[in-house]
Amino acid sequence: MKQFPDGHVRICSNNAIVNVAGNGVVDVMGHGNEVNVISGTVHVYGEDATVFVFDGVADVHGERSKVYVHDGTATVMDRDCQKLDCDGSGKLLLPDNSKVE
């Protein structure tokens, strides 16, 4: 498990669990990563990512992403999203070519 409170961090690994709980910016690159956004801004790249947004902002660029938004904002730039949930006051933004199953 990797935790980063502040700053700008780039993570290039597969199947990592990343918790972001600060004011910084984190770029997560690789496949099969699980990303928990508690606060801060996260850019997620790669395939098969699972992203939980509890608060903060997530930009998801990966193919076959699973995105869950409790509170905060997620922008999904992916043509093949498997699951998109939005609870509470969260906002989920999708491009026109995305599908929700």
Image (spheres, helix red, strand yellow):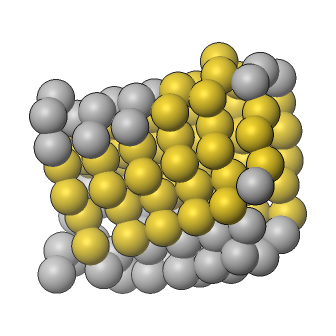
Q: Position of residue 43 (x, y in %)?
A: 62, 47
Q: Position of residue 41 (x, y in %)?
A: 58, 32
Looking at the image, residue 8 sits to the left or right of residue 75; the answer is right
Q: How many discs mark residues in the rendered view?
A: 0
Residue 55: which quarter of the image?
Answer: top left
Q: Residue at x 48, y 67 (%)?
A: 50
In the figure, 19 relative to 64: above or below?
A: above
| Residue 16 in view, yes or no | yes
In the figure, 38 relative to 67: above or below?
A: above
Looking at the image, residue 93 sits to the left or right of residue 33; the answer is left
Q: Residue at x 85, y 63 (%)?
A: 12
Q: Position of residue 83 (x, y in %)?
A: 26, 73
Residue 62: which quarter of the image?
Answer: bottom right
Q: Residue at x 82, y 23 (%)?
A: 7
Q: Position of residue 13 (x, y in %)?
A: 83, 69
Looking at the image, residue 43 sits to the left or right of residue 77; the answer is right
Q: Residue at x 15, y 43 (%)?
A: 87
Which quarter of the figure is the N terminus placed in? bottom right
| Residue 30 in view, yes or no | no
User: Which one is in front, 79 or 14?
Assistant: 14
Which quarter of the figure is the C terminus placed in? bottom left
Looking at the image, residue 24 sits to the left or right of residue 82; the answer is right
